[in-house]
Image (cartoon, grey):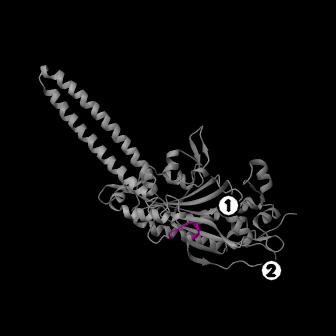
Amino acid sequence: MIDPQMLRDAPDLIKQSQRARGESETAVDDALAADTTRRSAIAAFENLRAEQNAFGKTVAKAPKDEKKELVAQAQQLAGRVKEAQAASTEADAAFDTAIRALGNVIIEGVPSGGEENFATLREVGTRPSFDFEPLDHADLGEKLGAIDIKRGTKVSGSRFYFLRGIGARLELGLMNMALDLTLRNDFTPLITPTLVRPEVMAGTGFLGAHADEIYYLPADDLYLTGTSEVALAGYHADEILDVTDGPIRYAGWSTCYRREAGAAGKDNRGILRVHQFNKLEMFSYVHPDQAEQEHLNLVALQETMMQSLELNYRVIDVAAGDLGSSAARKFDIEAWVPTQGTYRELSSTSNCTTFQARRLDTRYRTESGKTAPVATLNGTIATTRWLVAILETHQQADGSVVVPAALRPYLGGLEVMEPVS
């Protein structure tokens, strides 16, 4: 959630952010009013409690013949204290609900508007061209014996698939290539839980507008994660971290699950938009002053992967209305998909500033000895969806696919993926 002090000191800045997101400005006024009510209720409770403590001393010192009446007054005062405490608790909960309704305050320079209002920062590489009719990744995957959608549907339903043979090897090779890159850049690898408690899911901001995309197990009161970002954000909840020597970085490998609610008929072919996939996610805990630089660092690592895979891609600055509630800024990397004639998102990286850490109570110690929320950032360094661009970009006329040189060591030196007979 946002800083309550910022809400009090700069409500117009928060309203400006809400406008850019296409969200309610009135919610800022509601949060301010709830904050005023909460602070008044707390003050009333604390004053009554102080009065109760002082009166208790008076009762203790009173002569025996006066105590009966004083005890009766003390009991009445205790009732008022209890009511004031209940009112304070209720006001605190109302304020928490109101402030959690506000998205993170966007960083200056983020484009306003919705999904189509992004700003293109750069395009890198050359779009592939063919002297034959290129196949899409689903047909290529079938010819290579790499992707089995028919049996995935038979076993689990639509938007499920098997990766088999070279397809399974390709994904594992891609993940290990990305893992090696993160290891060279001081990331600690983690294989994360894929089931998390509600407070962790809520703490990362995923139970907002897109809550219907999350699988929930009511019998266990647990959520299936759509990204290891959730578990990585919860990893240091309720802890004080030492970030004086720079970012604390993790690379989380996990299977991910998404309902893709509202996406019926959209990208239903192949493995571009599916219910289950694997992902290696970078996650950084940093001093808030270093967050914007760390954001650029994560993007640079993603671009290293894209260039190593010899893909044509662009980097975009995502518009405010297309940000999740936790992100103050998000950069997407989109690769060219030849058969679709467009760029498609392969990777995102978000600067969540102190929004998640404030909810999850993850702090660092300031120079004055007090504690304050750290900043958190996340970014995908490899995922199943990348196979789409790799297969389509590097295909040949006979249905074979050239393995990018940087990926070959992870496939036992294989240079070309050949169709199966």
Task: Report the residue that reaches farthest toward the front.
Answer: 26
Determine crowd level at label 1: few under 14, some 14-19, many 20+ residues with C-alpha closer than 10 A: many
Q: Residue at x 21, y 27 (%)?
A: 73
Determine crowd level at label 2: few under 14, some 14-19, many 20+ residues with C-alpha closer than 10 A: few
Residue bearing the label numbered 2:
131
Question: Quadrant location of the C terminus?
Answer: bottom right
Question: Quadrant location of the N terminus?
Answer: bottom left
Q: Of helix, strand and loop, which one carries label 2?
A: loop
| Foreground of the two, 192 or 128 | 128
Give the mark, 1 or 2, whose residue is nearer the N terminus.
2
In terms of secondary structure, what is the magenta stretch mainly?
Answer: loop
Residue type at the position of mark 1: Thr
- Say whether residue 239 is visible: no
Residue type at the position of mark 2: Asp
Residue 186 image offset from top left, x and y in percent: 51, 64
**Image height of 418 relative to 241, above or below:** below
Residue 289 image offset from top left, x and y in percent: 40, 66
In the image, is 29 to the left or to the right of 333?
left
Task: Report the residue that reaches farthest toward the top.
Answer: 65
Q: For the magenta stretch, what is the residue range?
A: 111-116
In the image, is 247 to the left or to the right of 338?
left
Q: Is residue 112 magenta?
A: yes
| Foreground of the two, 255 or 178 | 255
| Foreground of the two, 302 or 89 | 89
Compute the Cα span from label 1 to label 2: 28 Å
Q: Residue at x 80, y 54 (%)?
A: 150
Residue 41 image offset from top left, x and y in percent: 31, 43
The numbered mark at residue 384 is 1
